């Protein structure tokens, strides 16, 4: 079979890495990069580190408003898929690249598979929520990472083509962790010791583009009295510059880091502060307490297990959580067995039989 994957944003390169390896064992795999992320540290570094082949197409769409970016992607993906005529189109997660890829495939009547299907925040003001709801309602095969995701789909009447295969990001971590130990120099180069720092990332528009929320988060980082390593998404660095806020030297603001360096920073942090979906899960994989700077999460199992605390953007709540949050309970295996990509590659053959 010929499978075409549509990727475009940082977490999608990470999700596609273990899948690409499995897909190539059984199928032809065409990789289409929309160009949503384009800086070296937001894109090429992941292909290099994770050994993902160069994309067959880079559509060079770049940044823009939601409508312009998604529309431009739709035009260019449609052209590419019309030439390639794959047997199945694979989309990942919930970005604008996901929605554009799904729409293009559906309109061309190409079978569509969604990796990381069924996640819901139940917050329609999140751009990702719109993208994932629409993608799930167009998909023929829906690969859920958790049981909650499968339940969410059932509640919306989607039961056909649904399977819980586990989380491909868990596969990615398991496949990379030995390499992290050998290759990442990040702790040494930042001159930090394991468990002597907190790791922070933020990039949700509700936190970066809302001055009140961003100021409260930065004030909490400033006043937490801890060393904080803060690799910032370009959206975030731009927003921090706009606030004119000075960060003290205990808060190390960095450019985005590579995947292996990020895993090293996560694994050795005393605690993680984030609004990222992927980072919440990785904190759980490593057994590092996670404070989520949002009001809700799609990864509810991590909060139910007691390892992830939702605090929103109140300065006082963030500081209190940094001081007091010390989970110790068990971490049930909720993200599968590390073979999600293998299962997806095999499942795709059912498209041929249907
Ligand atoms: C996107 C996804 C989000 C995902 C995140 C992962 C959507 C709606 N959002 O958000 O779900 O969690 O990626 O990181 O698809 N920029 C650069 N260089 C780059 C990329 C972006 O400077 O290589 C800057 C641009 O100013 C751009 C801004 O970041 O306008 C936002 O980028 P965009 O891709 O629109 O959204 P993300 O915030 O990255
Ligand atoms: N990540 C990375 N470098 C960074 C920040 C994040 O490699 O500087 C990785 C992180 O380990 C995780 C993924 O990017 O695997 C999460 O992506 P992001 O936070 O951009 O998006 P989200 O998961 O929220 O959609």
Image (tube, rainbow, N blue to C red):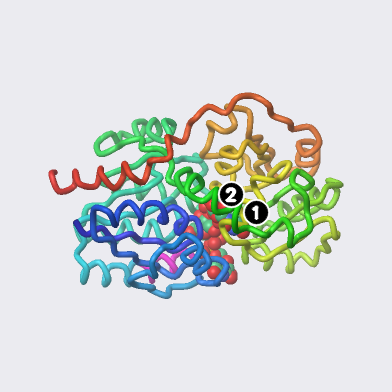
Give percent across and percent down for residue 9.
48, 61
Q: Are marks 1 and 2 in contact (CB under 8 Å)?
A: yes
Residue occupying the far left of the picture? 353
Q: Secondary structure at mark 1?
A: loop
In the image, 275 versus 29, the foreground residue is 29
- Quarter holding residue 330: top right
Q: Quadrant of residue 160?
A: top left
What is the secondary structure assignment of the residue under circle 2?
Answer: loop
Is 298 in the magenta?
Answer: no
- Kindly identify which residue carries mark 1: 202
Res. 79 in view? yes
Image quadrant in which the N terminus is located: bottom left
Q: Which residue is mark 2?
A: 276
The mark nearer the N terminus, 1 or 2, is 1
Q: Is residue 181 left or right of residue 95?
A: right
Residue 205 showing in the rendered view: no
Few, some or many residues within 10 Å of mark 1 (<14, 14–19, 20+): many
Magenta region: which residues?
A: 65-73
Q: Is residue 175 above or below residue 10?
A: above
Q: Which residue is outermost to the front? A: 182
Q: What residue is shown at x 84% (from left), y 56% (from top)?
A: 250
- Viewed as shown, does residue 123 lie left or right of 265? left
User: Residue 115 appears at what percent x and percent y?
Assistant: 37, 47
Q: Quadrant of ligand 2?
A: bottom right
User: What residue is rendered at 54% in x and 33% in y?
Assistant: 300
Residue 186, image x, y percentages: 68, 59
């Amino acid at each position: 079979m010929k499978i075409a994957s549509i990727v475009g944003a940082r977490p999608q390169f990470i999700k596609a890495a273990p899948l690409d390896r499995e897909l190539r064992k059984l199928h032809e795999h065409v990789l289409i990069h929309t160009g949503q992320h384009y800086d070296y540290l937001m894109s090429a570094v992941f292909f290099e580190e994770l050994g993902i082949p160069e994309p067959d197409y880079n559509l060079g769409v770049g940044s823009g408003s939601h409508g312009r970016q998604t529309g431009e992607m739709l035009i260019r993906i449609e052209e590419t898929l019309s030439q390639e005529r794959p047997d199945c189109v694979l989309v990942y997660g919930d970005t604008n690249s996901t929605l554009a890829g799904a729409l293009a495939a559906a309109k061309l009547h190409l079978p569509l598979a969604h990796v990381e299907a069924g996640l819901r925040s139940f917050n329609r003001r999140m751009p990702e929520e719109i993208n994932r709801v629409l993608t799930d309602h167009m998909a023929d095969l829906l690969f859920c990472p958790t049981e909650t995701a499968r339940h969410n789909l059932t509640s919306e009447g989607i039961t056909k083509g649904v399977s819980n295969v586990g989380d491909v990001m868990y596969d990615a971590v398991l496949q990379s962790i030995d390499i992290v130990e050998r290759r990442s120099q990040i702790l040494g180069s930042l001159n930090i010791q394991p468990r002597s720092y907190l790791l922070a990332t933020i990039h949700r528009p509700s936190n970066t583009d809302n001055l009140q929320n961003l100021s409260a988060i930065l004030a909490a980082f400033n006043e937490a009295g801890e060393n904080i390593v803060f690799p910032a998404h370009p959206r975030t660095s731009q927003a921090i510059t706009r606030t004119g806020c000075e960060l003290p030297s205990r808060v190390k603001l960095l450019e985005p880091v590579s995947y292996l360096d990020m895993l090293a920073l996560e694994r050795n942090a005393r605690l993680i502060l984030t609004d990222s979906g992927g980072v919440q899960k990785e904190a759980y994989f490593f057994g590092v307490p996670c404070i989520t700077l949002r009001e809700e999460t799609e990864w509810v199992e991590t909060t139910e297990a007691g390892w992830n605390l939702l605090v929103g953007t109140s300065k006082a709540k963030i500081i209190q959580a940094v001081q007091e949050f010390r989970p110790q309970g068990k971490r049930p295996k909720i993200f599968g067995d590390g073979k999600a990509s293998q299962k997806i590659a095999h499942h795709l053959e059912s498209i041929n039989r249907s």
